[in-house]
């Protein structure tokens, strides 16, 4: 390792800009892998941590970023599934660990074998883009909305059950549409009208434009809904979801942002939030975690069974702040920003 040098995009403090500075190359511990990071999928949560909107109790300066793809360069004790040279995608859970060594925005980062999948010959960029929201979407649908696992022979009765996915053209929503459709459900996708073709291509049976004047009436007419996932939603959107659920006699929806401040839902309608990464760190979900990362995700990547949103390659670590700024400004739609830490 002496011929390798690590550089990271350090976040000095809440409200501060990213700074490129050297970082140590860490030794992998029990069940850990050291990865040469080739592609990092930039996520909105990162700039929200920078802005203090997501108040994680982090020790600064730190390195953040969760989902990345690269090559295994060293394995720690207890690692049995991976070898040096394996091409992988992973979620390091670095933010939850409050440990800069696991932050994705560096040339060499630690992760655990439990949250790592082999990618075969799939590109690093697509693997990172897909996995960055896949783990949350499948946890949302299966663990929190109690849908069936996708598979080659889905229950034919699922076709009669409609799943409403709001924000279906977001990275999270796009993954959720494909997972639900693969489990045999009829998916109703809601997104901006310009993304109708995209959402239908992902497997949605029906599409409703989010800003259409008749959106509420159209969604009520398409119901009732077996489950509702708000993958990307505003306070106004949640009001519409509430009206739609109230029309079918009430119900519950899962939102990736929780019920927004000031939103008043109709009687019989509730919304809730879940921290999906926590699901994979819970020992009670060990079988689910193994299935997601060591079976299903590997299968869809190696066999190219799932579409990722188009990726925009931003460049090396020096472009990470620009990527965060673009997300903060709301200038990104239906695409995934990728940082390549070893590009510079």
Image (spheres, rainbow, N blue to C red):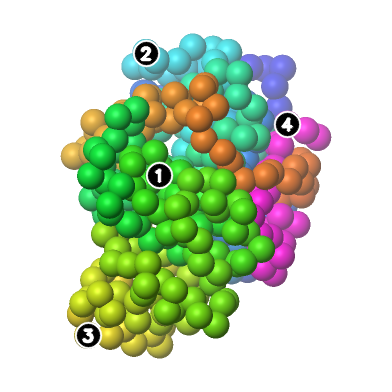
Residue drawn at the location 71% of the way across and 50% of the way down? 320
- On the image, the x and y values in percent for residue 23 come to 64, 37
Q: Which mark is residue 342?
A: 4
Provide the secondary structure element on which disc 3 rests.
Answer: loop
Q: Nearer the viewer, residue 342 or 40?
A: 40
Pair 3/1: label in front: 1
Circle 4 packing at 10 Å, graded few (<14), some (14-19), many (20+), is some
| C-alpha gap between disc 3 and disc 2 | 52 Å
Q: Which residue is mark 2?
A: 80
Report which residue position mark 3 lands on. 267
Q: Which residues are magenta?
A: 321-344
Q: Secondary structure at mark 4?
A: loop
In the rendered structure, which disc, 3 or 1, sits on the residue that comes first in sequence?
1
How much space separates mark 3 and mark 1, taking CA atoms? Answer: 30 Å
Residue 42 in view in this figure: no
Q: Does residue 109 appear to the left or right of 270 in the view shown?
A: right
| Residue at mark 4 to residue at mark 3: CA–CA distance | 53 Å
Task: Give the quarter of the image for residue 317.
Answer: top right
Q: Earlier in the sequence, mark 2 or mark 4?
A: 2
């Amino acid at each position: 390792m002496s011929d390798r040098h690590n550089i990271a995009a350090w976040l000095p403090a809440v409200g501060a800009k990213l700074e490129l500075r050297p970082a140590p190359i860490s030794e992998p511990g029990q069940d850990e892998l050291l990865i040469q990071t080739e592609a990092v999928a930039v996520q909105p949560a990162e700039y929200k941590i920078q802005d203090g909107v997501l108040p994680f109790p982090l020790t600064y300066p730190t390195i953040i970023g969760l989902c990345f793809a690269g090559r295994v360069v060293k394995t720690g004790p207890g690692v049995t599934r991976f070898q040096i040279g394996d091409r992988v995608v992973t979620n390091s859970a670095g933010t939850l660990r409050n440990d800069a060594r696991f932050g994705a925005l560096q040339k060499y980062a630690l992760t655990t074998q439990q949250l790592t999948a082999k990618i075969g010959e799939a590109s690093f960029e697509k693997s990172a883009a897909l996995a960055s929201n896949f783990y949350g979407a499948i946890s949302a649908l299966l663990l929190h909305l109690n849908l069936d696992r996708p598979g080659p022979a889905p229950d034919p009765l699922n076709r009669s059950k409609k799943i409403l996915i709001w924000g279906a053209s977001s990275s999270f929503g796009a993954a959720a549409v494909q997972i639900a459709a693969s489990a045999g459900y009829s998916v109703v996708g809601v997104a901006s009208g310009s993304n109708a073709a995209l959402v239908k291509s992902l497997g949605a049976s029906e599409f409703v434009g989010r800003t259409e004047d008749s959106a509420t009436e159209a969604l009520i007419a398409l119901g009732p809904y077996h489950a509702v996932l708000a993958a990307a939603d505003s306070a106004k959107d949640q009001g519409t979801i509430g009206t739609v659920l109230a029309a079918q006699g009430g119900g519950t929806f899962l939102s990736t942002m929780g019920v927004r401040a000031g939103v008043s839902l109709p009687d019989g309608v509730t919304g809730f939030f879940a921290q999906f990464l926590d699901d994979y760190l819970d020992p009670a979900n060990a079988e689910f975690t193994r299935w997601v990362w060591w079976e299903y995700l590997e299968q869809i990547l190696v066999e190219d069974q799932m579409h990722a949103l188009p990726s925009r390659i931003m460049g090396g670590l020096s472009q990470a702040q620009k990527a965060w700024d673009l997300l903060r400004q709301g200038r990104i739609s239906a695409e995934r920003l990728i940082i390549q830490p070893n590009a510079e």
